[in-house]
Amino acid sequence: MRKALIVAIIAVFAAFPATAQEYMEAVEKWKVVEVWGINYHGWSFHQDWEVDFTIDDQDGRFTPSDAEIAEAERLIQKRIDYVNRDHINQGGMCPVIDEHMHKYRRQYVGFTNSRGDHVIWVNFLWDDNLTDEKLASDVLLTSGGCGHFWHIQCNLATRKVCCLEVNSDGDIQYIPRAPKKGPRISRSKRDKNQKVRKTGIIHTQEEKQF
């Protein structure tokens, strides 16, 4: 009996390190990554970061790597003169974007299309009032401001730079995010007297107060 007890204790302690190791594994908490390179400075957003827009033929999302961002920047800086040859919403008090590439801070969002190509959507913002904290807090969509604000896409598979959109003239406005859907209200079909409960993903501390 005593021998069996000792064996049982040894088995428990032998299993403990494996259990402890499981709980010691770090839980991935993505933070927006700040990236630097030749003539660019910006923030890369994880594939799970929700955005209020899509691209043509979108099939999914991916997280741009540093190397992919560097390649996208190289292609954009090389071809922006041609892509921007019509200088839409530029000139006069509005800057010509390809003449001031170093002035813009960037935001990078990765998409995949139906062919599996990696497409990086790059947001260019020239606003000295924007803090780094604000630029790292969310993807900022804007209206107005002409050549101070624009975005473009770079397909890393085809090496194509396209879909340039430059803001129209007028005062700059930061477009608020679309409101998130609230937690879903559900009730058990079997028990009509069951209390109503809220289900769904909790995103903020405020949403926990129900």
Image (cartoon, grey):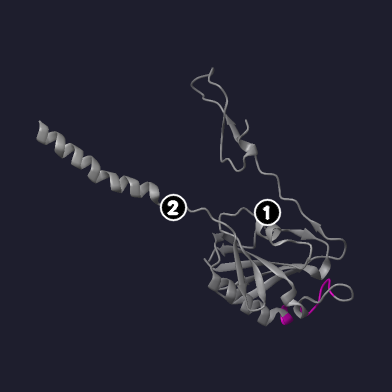
Tell me residue 191's x, y (percent).
50, 19
Residue occupying the point 73% across, 81% down: 81
Residue at the image point whose x is 56% and y is 63% from the top: 112
Q: Considering only vertical position in the picture, is 150 above or below 91?
A: above
Q: Is residue 21 magenta?
A: no
Could you tell me which secondary element the residue under label 2 belongs to? loop
Judged from this view, the residue extending furthest toward the top is: 193
Disc assigned to residue 52: 1
Q: Which residues are magenta?
A: 81-90
Residue at horizontal 57 percent and vertical 25 percent from the top = 196
The mark found on residue 91 in the picture is: none
Percent position (x, y) of residue 181?
65, 41
Residue at 66 percent of width and 55 percent of height: 137
Q: How many marks?
A: 2
Q: Amino acid at mark 1?
A: Asp
Question: Which residue is most to the right?
Answer: 92
Q: Position of residue 49 (x, y in %)?
A: 59, 54
Q: Quadrant of residue 148?
A: bottom right
Question: Which residue does the numbered mark 2 point to in the structure image?
Answer: 26
Q: Nearer the viewer, residue 24 or 114?
A: 24
Distance (Cα) linking label 2 and label 1: 30 Å
Quadrant of the drawing holding the C terminus:
top right
